[in-house]
Image: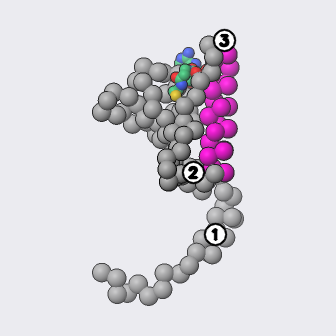
Amino acid sequence: MSLEPDKRKGEIAFIVADPWQGLGLGTKLVDYTIEIAKDMGVETLYAIMLSDNYQAINLLKNMGFTLQSQEDGTIKGILNLREEMQQDMPERECRKNQEKAEPLGDVSNIT
Ligand SMILES: CC(C)(COP(=O)(O)OP(=O)(O)OC[C@H]1O[C@@H](n2cnc3c(N)ncnc32)[C@H](O)[C@@H]1OP(=O)(O)O)[C@@H](O)C(=O)NCCC(=O)NCCS
């Protein structure tokens, strides 16, 4: 994982040697990287792949990444980790955090 200077976005690259492919190692590798990125407070993970790299594209699609075709013909897989963490968070914790949120105050004069 290579973090951008603001540390909010990280690009991932992953490789499994040929004899060990198709056994679930690539999935584990990406899953573990996602957990590390969440712990580090990274907000978005992405990977750039060639459009015929079906293994990598399928792997990321299965893991919930959104796929975008790029102008240069590559495919960008994007995962929003903030959304992921909201989904991971038990409903009770989520409610507690919402209750803790600062009230907006008087919003009647906002145009
Ligand atoms: C992409 C890569 C890491 C996948 O590793 P892997 O250990 O084979 O992946 P997994 O065994 O976890 O398989 C995950 C998914 O990949 C897809 N996949 C794996 N082998 C595939 C194949 N031969 N054809 C099509 N899809 C395949 C499947 O969707 C699979 O999900 P499934 O279990 O539901 O079938 C590996 O092919 C690789 O190292 N490729 C070269 C490097 C690369 O392209 N990296 C990505 C860009 S940075």
Between the residue at mark 3 and the residue at mark 1, the CA separation in whole angstroms equals 46 Å
Q: Nearer the viewer, residue 80 or 92?
A: 80
Expressed as whole percent of the image width and height from the top left, the position of residue 75 reads 41, 31
The amino acid on which the numbered mark 2 sits, given as a three-letter code, is Val
For the point 53% across and 45% down, the residue is 3
Kindly give the residue lying farthest to the front in the view shown.
Answer: 5
Identify the mark nearer the N-term, 3 or 2: 3
Which disc number belongs to residue 97? 1
Residue 27 figure quarter: top right
Identify the mark nearer the N-term, 2 or 1: 2
* 67 shown above or below 15: below
Secondary structure beneath dot 3 equals: helix
Residue 98 figure quarter: bottom right
Q: Which residue is mark 2?
A: 42
Q: Per the image, is 22 magenta?
A: yes
Which disc number belongs to residue 19? 3
Q: Is residue 26 visible?
A: yes
